[in-house]
Amino acid sequence: MRKMRLLFLVLLAAGLAFAAQMPQGVQTQKADSGTMVLADAKGMTLYTYGKDEPGKSNCNGLCAHFWPPLTAPVDAQPMSDWTVITRKDGSKQWAYRDKPLYTYDKDKKPGETKGEGSGNVWHQATP
């Protein structure tokens, strides 16, 4: 029993350490698909775009209308696996492991993953 309690505490500490290294409002959650994903402050699934380059968003204009970027404050600072990129329009966006992050406008409730696999280039962002 004591070993189980210790294991639980270690796992809890690891989870809290991971959470402490994420931008404010970003969270992990189990999506409708059953996969653990990154989500925004509203619980909406975050996605990566296969046509992006490391540290650079290629989803602009109409693309960004349907796939809104996960915006970062102007004064946001990189932390652990999280970086801040400057978009084509000058706004700031969060990237996880050099992959810019987006939500999908057709996901209407937290945990939905309707964008997964779209065009064979959109994928759920996983921790």
Image (tube, rainbow, N blue to C red):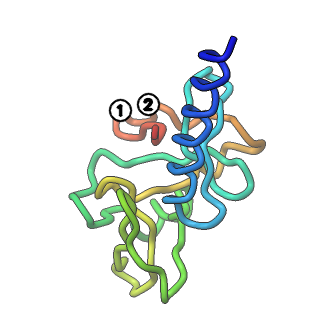
Of helix, strand and loop, which one carries label 2?
Answer: loop
Q: Residue at x 74, y 42 (%)?
A: 110
Circle 1 sits on which residue? 120
Dividing the image into 4 quarters, which one contains the C terminus? top left
- Residue 123, image x and y in percent? 43, 37
What residue type is disc 2 on? Gly
Name, please, the residue furthest toward the right: 109
Of helix, strand and loop, which one carries label 1?
Answer: helix
Q: Residue at x 39, y 87 (%)?
A: 90
Depth check, front residue: 101 or 63: 101
Q: Residue at x 69, y 11 (%)?
A: 1
- Residue 117, image x and y in percent? 44, 30
Q: Residues within 10 Å of mark 2 (few under 14, many from 20)?
A: few
Q: Is residue 28 above or below residue 10?
A: below
Q: Which mark is residue 64?
A: none
What residue type is disc 1 on? Asn
Q: Which mark is residue 117?
A: 2
Q: Residue at x 57, y 23 (%)?
A: 7
- Residue 36, image x and y in percent? 56, 31
Q: Is residue 57 above or below residue 109?
A: below
**In the drawing, does residue 113 fall left or right of residue 53?**
right
Depth check, front residue: 4 or 102: 4
